């Protein structure tokens, strides 16, 4: 899924931003119209991860 977003945005790379939880940073794709992503798998993150992610991502791009 992340690769599809990056390809659609014609992004050769993702910028690594602030950490939401240990091991899970915000990634930003695109320069002119950036999109913030959080790639999370398994049990990374705390119970309020999604609320924190939205807060961090609003200020990331």
Image (cartoon, rainbow, N blue to C red):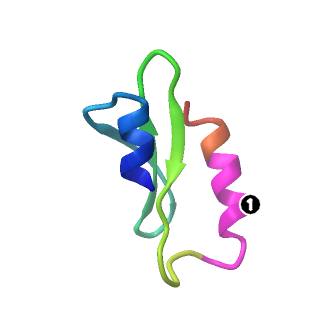
Relative to 14, residue 1 above or below? below
Position of residue 28 measured from the top left corner of the image (x, y, whole percent): 45, 38
- Magenta-drawn stretch contains 54: yes
On the rendered image, what quadrant is the N terminus found in? bottom left
- Magenta-drawn stretch contains 53: yes
Main secondary structure type of the part rendered in magenta: helix
Relative to 45, residue 24 above or below? above
Question: Which residue is drawn at the image coordinates 35% and 37% (left, top)?
Answer: 7
Is 54 displayed left or right of 6 in the figure? right
**Residue bearing mark 1:** 51
On the rendered image, what quadrant is the C terminus found in? top right
Relative to 17, residue 11 above or below? above
Question: Which residue is drawn at the image coordinates 36% and 49% (left, top)?
Answer: 3
Is 4 displayed left or right of 53 in the figure? left
Position of residue 4 measured from the top left corner of the image (x, y, whole percent): 41, 46
Question: Which residue is drawn at the image coordinates 70% and 79% (left, top)?
Answer: 47
Foreground of the two, 3 or 22: 3
Position of residue 26 measured from the top left corner of the image (x, y, whole percent): 48, 49
Position of residue 32 measured from the top left corner of the image (x, y, whole percent): 47, 15
The stretch in magenta equals 46-56
Furthest residue toward top: 32
**Neighbourhood count class around disc 1 (C-alpha, 10 Å): few under 14, some 14–19, many 20 upward:** few
Instruction: Give the structural element (helix, strand or loop) at label 1.
Output: helix
Foreground of the two, 47 or 33: 33
Question: Which residue is drawn at the image coordinates 47% and 74% (left, top)?
Answer: 41
Q: How many marks?
A: 1
Foreground of the two, 21 or 43: 43
């Amino acid at each position: 899924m992340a690769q599809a977003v990056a390809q659609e945005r014609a992004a050769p790379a993702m910028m690594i931003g602030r950490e939401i939880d240990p091991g899970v940073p915000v990634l930003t794709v695109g320069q002119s119209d950036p999109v913030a992503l959080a790639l999370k798998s398994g049990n990374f993150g705390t119970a309020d991860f999604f609320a924190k992610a939205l807060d961090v991502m609003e200020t990331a791009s």
